[in-house]
Amino acid sequence: MFAATLSRWTMSYFAAALIFLVLGEIMMVLGYGYPVSALEAPETLALVHAVVLGWLSLLMTGALLQFVPVLVGRPLSFPSVALPALLFLIAGIAGLTLGFVSLSGAIDLPVTVLPVGAAFSIVGFSVLGFAFAATLWHARPLPLPARFVAVGLAALFGTMLLGGVYAGVLSGLIDAEAAIDLTIDGLSLHASLGLCGWLSFTTMGVSYRLLTMFMLSPDKERTSSRVVFALGALCLGLLAAAVPVILAGTFGRSSLLLLAVGSGAAVVAIYIADILRIYRERRRKAIELNSRASIGAFASLIAATALFVALLATGRLDAGSGAVIYLVAFGWLTGMGLAQLYKIVPFMTWLECYGPALGRMPTPRVQDLVVEVSALRWFWLYYLTVALGTLALLIGSVVLFRFASLGQLIAVNALILEFVRTRRLINVPAELRLPDGLVRPGLFLPSIPHGGSHEPRSL
C-alpha cells in the first residue's frame, strides 16, 4: 500500500528547512552577510550555512527519506534514524550559524560552538547517509537516478570532511599546517562539492524520476542521461582530486579545475536537453504548476552556467562569483525545491489522509488539495526577485539587493502559507474533506496510533 511507504518524518524535515529559508531571507533583507560583507566574512558564512545546510540540505535529506525507496523499489534501511538525525542536524546547523555570528563579533559565545556545531551536523548527515547508502547497496544493480544519489552522497561525505577541518581551523582547535593550507586554498572546493555535487547532482538524478512520474513521460534510461551521469561523476572526481594536490603543494590544481569546469558545463547542457525531451514527450497535456514553476529553476541553472563561463573567460570570476553562487542557490536549487514541494506536499498529504480510503468512499483528487491560481503569482514574484537580486549583485547595488530579498521573503512566506493550507485540507470541498471519520493529518509531525488502533491521530 502507498500509505505504508510514507516517510513519517519527511514533513518535519520540510518544516525545519523552510524555517531556515525564512531565516536566511530575513538576514539578506537586513543586510547581514554578502554583499554588505565580503564573501569570506563570518557574516556571509553564517548566512551561507543557514541557507545551504539549514534549508537546502534539510530539504534534500527529507525528500530522500521519501524518494530513495521509490527510486530503488525497496523500503528504507534503518528508518528509525530519521528523528534523531533531524535533532542532531537542527542543533548542529544552529550551532554552526551562531558560531560564525560569534566570529564576526556580534555576539560572544564560547569558541567551541563552531566545531561542536560542525560535529553535530556531521553526525546527523552521516547517520542519514548510512541509511541511504545501505538502502542503495541492498538494491543493486541501481537504476540511473539512484546512481546519481549515490554519487551525491559521496560528495556530501567529502563536503563534511572539508567542513570539519575548516571549523576546527577557524575556531583555533586545529593548527596543523596542512589543515590551514586546505582552509585557505580549498574553501571553493568545499562550496563546489556541496552545491554542485551533493545538492545539484542529486537534484538532477531525482528530477529525472519525479518529472517523468508527475508528467507521465516515458521513464527509460537514455544514452544522454548516462552521459550526464558519467561526466558529472568525472567532474566531481576532478574536484575531489584537487584536495590532495593542495595538501602536497604540487602544481596541477588549475588544470584539474579547468577540466572540471568543462565537464560540468557539458553536464548542464546535456541535462537540459534531457529535461526538454521529458517535457515534450509528456502524456499529461496540461502541465501542473509544480512542473511549470520548475522551468524557472532550469532557466536559472542555464543562466548560472553561462554567467560562470563568461566570468571565467573574461577574468572577472572573483568579482562575479557571488552572483553565480546566489543564482545557483536561490534560482536553481531553491526554485526547484519550492516548485517540487508544491507537488510533494499535496501528494504525501493525499496518501496519508485519503490513500487508505481509496475505493471505499469518494475521495478528492490530489489537485483538489491546491489552488494553482493562488500560488502562481507567488512563483512569478519569487523568480522575478531572484533575477533582480542577481542583477543587483552584478552591478554592486546593496539597496537593490535588499529590496529583491524583501520580495523573495514575501513570496516564500506566501508559498509556505499555501503548503499549510494544503496540509490542513482547507482547499478541499467540504463534502469531500473528511468523510466518515477520516482524520486530518498533522501539520508537520507524523500521525500516531490512537487508542491502540491503526487509525491516525493528528499532532
Image (cartoon, rainbow, N blue to C red):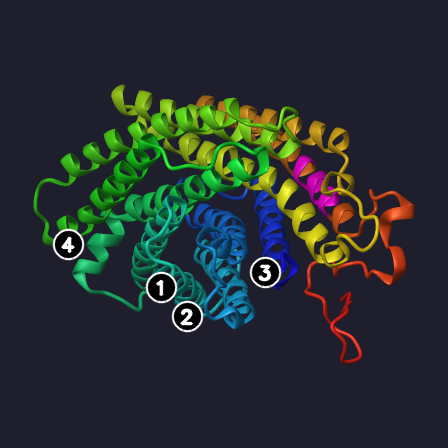
Circle 1 packing at 10 Å, graded few (<14), some (14-19), many (20+), is: some
Name the spot of residue 320 as percent of width and height, x first.
Answer: 37, 28
Marks 4 and 2: in contact by CB < 8 Å?
A: no
- Asked if residue 172 lies left or right of residue 12, the reply is left
Considering only vertical position in the picture, is 150 above or below 377? below
Q: Quadrant of residue 454?
A: bottom right
What is the spatial separation of the Cα atoms under label 3 and label 1, in whole angstroms? 43 Å
Q: Which residue is mark 1?
A: 171
Mark 1: amino acid: Ser
Structural crowding at the residue carrying mark 4, measured as other residues with C-alpha within 10 Å and reported as few (<14), some (14–19) or many (≥20): some
Question: Going 36% across and 44% down the picture, which residue do you hit?
Answer: 144
Q: Single out the mark in the foreground, 1 or 4.
A: 4
The majority secondary structure of the magenta stretch comes to helix
- Mark nearer the viewer, 2 or 3: 3
**Residue that appears at 71% across and 55% down:** 355
Any mark on residue 112, and which? 2
User: Among all residues in the image, which is located at the extreme right?
Assistant: 431
Residue corresponding to mark 3: 5
Q: Amino acid at mark 3?
A: Thr
Instruction: Look at the numbered discs 1 and 2 and tell me whether their residues touch, using CB distance below 8 Å.
Output: yes
* Residue 209 visible in image: yes
Give the residues in magenta: 411-419
Q: Earlier in the sequence, mark 2 or mark 3?
A: 3
